[in-house]
């Protein structure tokens, strides 16, 4: 079954949701249209396929066989308390910026924002036993923000039970 969503104009939130659903394997396309009335009184519609197979990136393109990674396949490998922490963290991220995209890998889930020029990777989460690890992509974030100040703020606001570790990533 294929879903086809047609909207008037451009809505980045809807585009992000449709792209996200494609990463989960939903066969869904997004078509945007614009209505014009020219001076002679003629009416015109302009249609554009915004999200579909032709626009897929490696993270939204479906991969056949057992190498296909989905968010669900990643987090179901984790213990239930780690899954719950992940869902809380994910909700806070998406509440802060609903245009963030999710990129599942073999054992981790990354969050990124697609800009006009490139992807800006925010962080990657993975779990090992009873520990949820969050790695912030400083290499990707530094051109867009003061990473040192952000890390200091996160460390200061972290609960006592949270362990922070600085590394290359």
Image (cartoon, grey):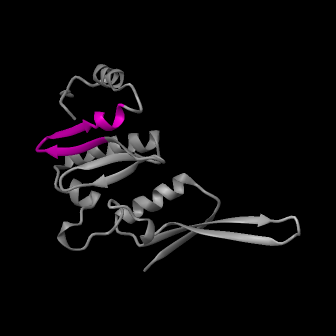
Q: Nearer the viewer, residue 71 or 56?
A: 56
Q: How many marks?
A: 0
The image quarter in which residue 138 lies: top left
Q: Position of residue 75 (x, y in %)?
A: 23, 53
Give the side of residue 55 with respect to residue 30, left or right: left
Give the side of residue 50 with respect to residue 126, left or right: right
Q: Position of residue 30 (x, y in %)?
A: 52, 67
Q: Is residue 30 magenta?
A: no
The image quarter in which residue 124 lies: top left
Q: Position of residue 85 (x, y in %)?
A: 27, 42
Give me the residue at 47% from left, 55% from top: 16
Give me the residue at 32% from left, 61% from top: 58
Q: Nearer the viewer, residue 39 or 70?
A: 39
Q: Is residue 141 above or below residue 33?
A: above
State which region is magenta: 123-142
Q: Nearer the viewer, residue 65 or 57?
A: 57
Magenta stretch prevailing secondary structure: strand
Q: Position of residue 110 (x, y in %)?
A: 29, 48
Q: Is residue 31 above or below residue 102?
A: below
Give me the residue at 30% from left, 40% from top: 123
Give the side of residue 6 with respect to residue 37, left or right: left
Q: Locate the C terminus and report the quarter of the image it occupies.
A: top left
Q: Given the current orientation, which residue lies at the most extreme bottom position? A: 1
Q: Locate the N terminus and report the quarter of the image it occupies.
A: bottom left
Q: Is residue 130 magenta?
A: yes
Q: Given the current orientation, which residue lies at the most extreme right position? A: 40
Give me the residue at 19% from left, 66% from top: 67
Q: Is residue 71 above or below residue 89?
A: below
Q: Is residue 82 above or below residue 41?
A: above
């Amino acid at each position: 079954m294929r879903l086809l969503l047609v909207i008037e104009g451009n809505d980045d939130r809807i585009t992000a949701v449709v792209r996200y659903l494609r990463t989960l394997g939903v066969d869904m396309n997004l078509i945007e249209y614009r209505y014009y009335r020219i001076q002679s009184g003629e009416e015109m519609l302009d249609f554009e396929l915004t999200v579909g197979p032709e626009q897929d990136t490696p993270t939204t393109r479906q991969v056949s066989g057992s190498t296909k990674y989905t968010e669900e396949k990643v987090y179901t490998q984790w213990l239930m308390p780690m899954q719950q922490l992940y869902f809380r963290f994910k909700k806070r991220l998406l509440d802060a910026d609903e245009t963030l995209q999710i990129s599942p890998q073999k054992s981790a889930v990354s969050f990124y924002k697609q800009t006009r020029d490139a992807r800006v990777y925010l962080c990657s989460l993975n779990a090992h036993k009873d520990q949820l690890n969050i790695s912030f992509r400083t290499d990707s974030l530094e051109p867009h923000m003061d990473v040192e100040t952000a890390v200091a703020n996160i460390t200061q606001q972290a609960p006592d039970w949270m362990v922070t570790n600085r590394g290359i990533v």
